[in-house]
Amino acid sequence: MQISTLQVVLDATQKIDVANLLERLLTWGMEVGKDIIGAILIYVVGRFIIRQITRLISKILEKRKLEISVQTFLKSLLSLLLNLILAFAIIGKLGVETTSFAALLASAGVAIGMALSGNLSNFAGGLIILVFKPFRVGDYIDAVGGASGTVKEIQIFHTILGTPDNRVIFVPNGALSSNAVTNYSKEGLRRVDFSFGVEYGADFHQVKQVLGDIIAADSRVLQTPEPFIALGELAASSVNITVRVWVKAADYWDVKFGLTQAVYDTFNEKGISFPFPQLTIHQG
């Protein structure tokens, strides 16, 4: 009789435990289901918002006429950041602690940044150059460290220059973006400066007239702005005549060398002498 009663009690207890367990499982399932449904909604809405933002940014970048490589990189970077934000939102909705993930990503970012500090500087410099365009492919520039040449290619880490003697120079973009760069091709016109020395006693007005005729005969020299000829300096052994003319940027070197040769030939024909260094010694 006692055994029978105990068995009944045990059976009732098991039934109560099973019912309680099922109730708990049902409650947990409903809560998890709501979280899963919420996470799915966040994902769907988030992806829609990301697509809209990406399209808007793409239109803005296209209107600014940025380089294709820059547009692709910026869009990829934006997409990565937005998707990371979306992933954290979904993980948080599912009840997973996101603080540890954020700390891990921050630590990894600091470590990577310290290891690649130089390359990151060049990378940032490349973005600055491609976005703000202080120079373009085909421009002739003077860069840091005496590097000069025509820009052949602007890469994300380096800018490639081609020199007149057919050398190739790789200049880090970090240095280019943080130092002075002279761009000789930015403007359409350039001024060519000369200083011609003649002997003391030479007729300055004759020399000026001859120089004016030489300049007028060269069609590459622009008349606006007007060519400038003046007595520039009374040096130790010569009278130096300053000449300044404006030309198209593409004609700079041809005019520089051409006018120099023309002055030399014409001065010899006209009997205008070039001085030699002289030293006068007086004995008491």
Image: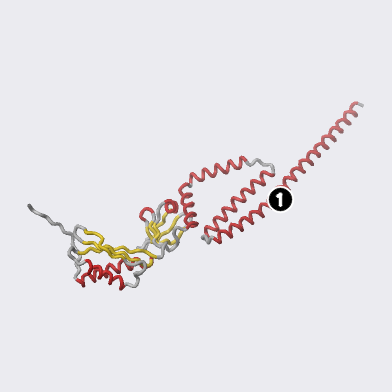
Of residue 199 and residue 136, the one placed in the foreground of this image is: 199
Q: Report which residue position mark 1 lands on.
A: 41
Rendering quarter of residue 278: bottom left
Residue situated furthest left in the rendering: 284
Q: Please state the horizontal and vertical placement of residue 240, each as a whole percent of the image.
A: 24, 62
**Quarter of the rendering occupied by the N terminus:** top right
Q: Nearer the viewer, residue 25 or 45?
A: 45
The front one of 92 and 4 is 92
Which residue occupies the extreme top position in the image?
Answer: 2
Front in this rendered view, residue 211 or 32? 211
Q: Is residue 28 above or below residue 228?
A: above
Q: Residue furthest right?
A: 1
- Secondary structure under the numbered disc 1 in the rendered image: helix
- Under mark 1, the amino acid is Leu
Instruction: Give the residue at x 87% y 30%.
Output: 9
Q: What residue appears at the point 84 percent right and 32 percent down from the top-left corner?
A: 13
Residues packed near mark 1 inside 10 Å, few (<14), some (14 to 19) or many (20 plus): few
- Residue at x-position 21% and y-position 70%: 268
